[in-house]
Image (spheres, helix red, strand yellow):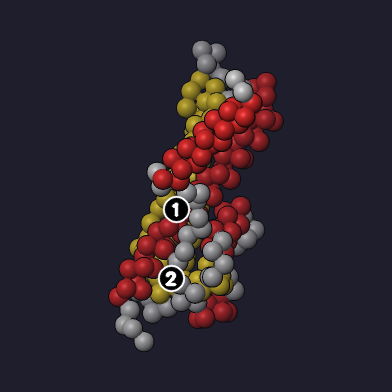
């Protein structure tokens, strides 16, 4: 085949794939936009979940995150993280009785309210579960994999929380009188 025609066929294929992917509605994940200009959060940056939540809240760039309790009255809404719970449950054992699988669990409860106490999101718990195989001969790599899974779960929960905050915020903004 002529190299020129081969190049044209390749370019045509790339064009068709690009238009097909764009035409089907595919888009890269965008940061969650909230109608709030400022959010008070009672969480700390000292935990991996707190860092993931801060990153998710700050991603759009138009939200002021307040974590100082003395400045709480400056926030439009208050996001309260009520508790975070990690669990590691045995899923399976070998015939010899050694563990060969675990289930990692992460549960986080939160609520969202306005300054006047109106609950926009009542106490809600988000729970994620991940299964992980285990092998005694590669303990260090399995521990690293476990930490990576927990970090991914924390990021997923932070993103889910912000999607819920954005949805509640849009409903709240629609109910506010026009000034």
Image quadrant containing the N terminus: top right
Question: Residue at position x 52%, y 77% from top?
Answer: 72
Say left or right for 111 vs 48.
left
Residue 88 visible in the picture = no
Location of residue 4 (image quadrant): top right
Question: Residue at position x 46%, y 72% from top?
Answer: 36
CA–CA distance in space, label 2 to label 1: 16 Å
Question: Residue at position x 57%, y 33% from top?
Answer: 8
Does label 2 or label 1 sit earlier along the sequence? 2
How busy is the neighbourhood of tag 2: few (under 14 within 10 Å), some, or many (20 plus)?
some
Q: Nearer the viewer, residue 173 or 51?
A: 173
Residue 60 visible in the picture = yes
Query: 34 above or below 156?
Result: below
- Would you name the residue on which mark 1 appears? 160
Q: Nearer the viewer, residue 68 or 28?
A: 28
Question: Residue at position x 54%, y 50% from top?
Answer: 155
Query: 69 above or below 13?
Result: below
How busy is the neighbourhood of tag 1: few (under 14 within 10 Å), some, or many (20 plus)?
some
**Picture disc at residue 35:** 2
Pinpoint residue 122: horizontal percent, then vertical percent: 35, 63
State how many labels appear. Answer: 2
Q: Secondary structure at mark 1?
A: helix
Image quadrant containing the C terminus: bottom left
**Picture disc at residue 116:** none
């Amino acid at each position: 085949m002529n190299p020129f025609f081969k190049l044209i066929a390749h370019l045509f294929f790339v064009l068709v794939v690009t238009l097909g992917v764009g035409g089907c509605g595919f888009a890269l994940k965008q940061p969650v936009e909230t109608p709030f200009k400022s959010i008070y959060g009672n969480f700390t940056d000292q935990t991996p979940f707190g860092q993931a939540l801060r990153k998710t809240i700050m991603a759009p760039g138009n939200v002021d995150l307040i974590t100082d309790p003395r400045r709480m009255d400056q926030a439009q809404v208050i996001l309260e993280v009520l508790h975070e719970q990690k669990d590691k449950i045995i899923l399976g054992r070998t015939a010899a009785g050694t563990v060969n699988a675990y289930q990692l669990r992460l549960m986080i409860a939160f609520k969202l309210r306005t300054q006047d106490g109106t609950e926009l999101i009542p106490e809600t718990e988000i729970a994620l579960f991940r299964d992980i195989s285990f092998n005694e001969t590669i303990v260090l790599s399995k521990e690293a994999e476990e930490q990576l899974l927990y970090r991914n779960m924390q990021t997923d929960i932070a993103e889910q929380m912000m999607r819920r905050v954005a949805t509640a915020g849009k409903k709240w903004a629609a109910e506010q009188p026009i000034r």
